[in-house]
Amino acid sequence: MSSIVLPLVLMPLLIIGIGKFTVYQIQKSQEQVVKIAFVNESIAPELADAIQKQDKTEVVKIEGDLSEAVKNDKIDAGIIIPTDFQTSLDKQTPIQIKVIRNSTSSKSTTALSRITAGLVVYNNEVLQSRFSKQKINPTVLASVTAVPEDVATEKERGGFGLGFILPLFIVMWSIIGGQYTAIDASAGEKERKTLEALILTPVRRLNIVFGKFLAVSTVALLSVVISLVSLYIGLKFSGSSIYNQASQTAAAGTNSESLNIVFSLEPKAIIILLAASLFLVFMFSAILLSISIFAKSYKEAQSYIGPAYLIVILPTVFVNTLPGLKPALWFFALPVMNAILLYKEVLMGTYDWNHILVTVGSLVVYSLVAIFLAAKIYSKEGILFRD
Amino acid sequence: MQVKNLTKTFNGFKAVDDVSFEAQAGEVFGLLGPNGAGKTTTIRVIATVLAPTSGTAEVCGFDIVKNPEEVRKNIGVLTTDIGVYDRFTGRENLIYFGELYGLTGSALDKRISQLSKLLEMDDFIDRRAGKYSTGMKQKLAIARSVIHDPKVIIFDEPTAGLDVLAAQTVLNFMKQAKEQGKCVILSTHRMPDADKLCDRVAIIHQAKIIANDTIDLLKHKTYASNMEEAFLNLVKK
């Protein structure tokens, strides 16, 4: 149950849910009406006007201390215009206006960015009038402007987004998926006292371990596949539009090029993802079996396996937080880390055969070692009869 | 079945110390002793679940060290701690173990219905084992241990925790097995059971065998009228 239904429901829910939530938050902050109050508004009416003309910006009158009002959330930002504003403007010396804001409030941050945008407009107006008075073409100001052009393909952009979260999920499900079966087949048999009846049969100890191992890895693999398929279907129907929206709205301020993100995976990618997952699952299954045969009971086994998640989550965090990590080849020989790096690459459409071979090859070796260890542990009589 | 100078130590502690005895086909051999005397460990070593520290045993001519799989094929062991798969019915439990013993198809079906009749399990064999009473579970465990019709049957405390009726079924089953020419070994600390059933007994006390004889001779030697007295006299010596 837990290894099939959970990934089926949880995966799309999480990914799409997070996407929807991000879009909602971005939209909400854009639609927020911010309140701004001025001191000495009458000294600089054009400046106040330029700010007021910004979208969803409301100017209110406040009696008393502006800082107090910002603190109490009565307004989101306050602007104090110096009394010598007009004289400085006439003398063409730099003017500083004070903006009071609260950096812990997201609404206040939005207010600040609208004020800054208003100031840009106002500055342009002032400069234009100054230039035209001296008969200079205002375009001299715009010496260089940047026109961004993204070399990342649509697929890479899609993969980049998924590359953060998908590897973690694959790795997590390959543990969580097999966990229940592993505990049940070892510590569970001990607790139910069926283990002795099982090893009394003529079946060889090695075959018993191998049977248990196959059961654990089948279930684990099934939950990995189910989580991926349900995620894929979920994204197909609603997800990609969400991600487009999210990245578009996020990018709206900086550039206007449209971001189309595609989540199509080539068959080649799917095969590589599955191959790496398969051996990752084998490795984890054998490790889970070995850990849980040490335990006398279900609960004890769970407390042993709990810390194992850390081993999985740490490399993912490491890979995801290091900016522009260019992994050396030996990174692809580290268990778990290699799978996460490879998933990321493949999702972005990069196929480095050295990386693929080292990853899959080392995972094969690790899983064989893990299976061998599990078989060794199962043939220790002390562990089987630890009452 | 022959046990020769069997010794098993756990981290220096001697659980079984130089134990030797012999049991023949067509008899019930009693392995008697107080709790913790080493009966269960002896059985586990004979059943090849534990490896002997020294000495060996032979079951139907197969050595427990050299031929453990053949030994397991010819031996049926009822353990003290019986556990069954709760989510399976009694029949499914038997099918599962039957297949592990290499039985399949109609031969397995036949054996199951035979055992079910013999142990009076027909009423509950198709119910989930999780709902069984202690007596039902014990019957299921017995059926499981002899599903492959072994030549040697070892029962470790088979009547522990059972009511009189259920205990009677179990004892009758052992009697029948003996009549069929099986070698039956009963390990117990309940002397009345041994008195009723066993032809010969070995008494294990503190990991060593302190007596090995027919019931009548033992009673005679210790001037006792029943096994309980005989046992007490022997152990206190």
Image (cartoon, rainbow, N blue to C red):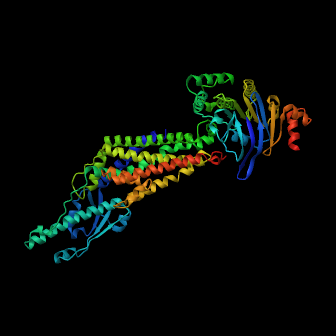
Measured as percent of width and height from the top left, residue A157 is found at 29, 52
Where's the N terminus of chain B, which quadrant?
top right
Measured as percent of width and height from the top left, residue B190 is found at 80, 35
The answer to which quarter of the image holds residue A102 is bottom left
Q: Nearer the viewer, residue A210 or B122?
A: A210
Residue displayed at 72% across by 49% down:
B9
Where's the C terminus of chain B, which quadrant?
top right
Q: How many marks?
A: 0
One can see residue A90 in this view: yes
Q: Residue furthest left?
A: A135
Measured as percent of width and height from the top left, residue B147 is found at 64, 28
Q: Nearer the viewer, residue A205 or A171?
A: A205
Residue displayed at 69% across by 42% down:
B45
A125 relative position to B171: left or right: left
Q: Is residue A92 above or below residue A337?
A: below
Q: Is residue B101 above or below residue A82?
A: above
One can see residue A75 in this view: no
The answer to which quarter of the image holds residue A329 is bottom left
A35 relative position to A183: left or right: left
Q: Is residue B55 above or below residue A52?
A: above
B86 relative position to A66: left or right: right
Q: Nearer the viewer, residue A216 or A305?
A: A216
The answer to which quarter of the image holds residue B130 is top right
Measured as percent of width and height from the top left, residue A17 is found at 37, 46
Q: Residue furthest right?
A: B223
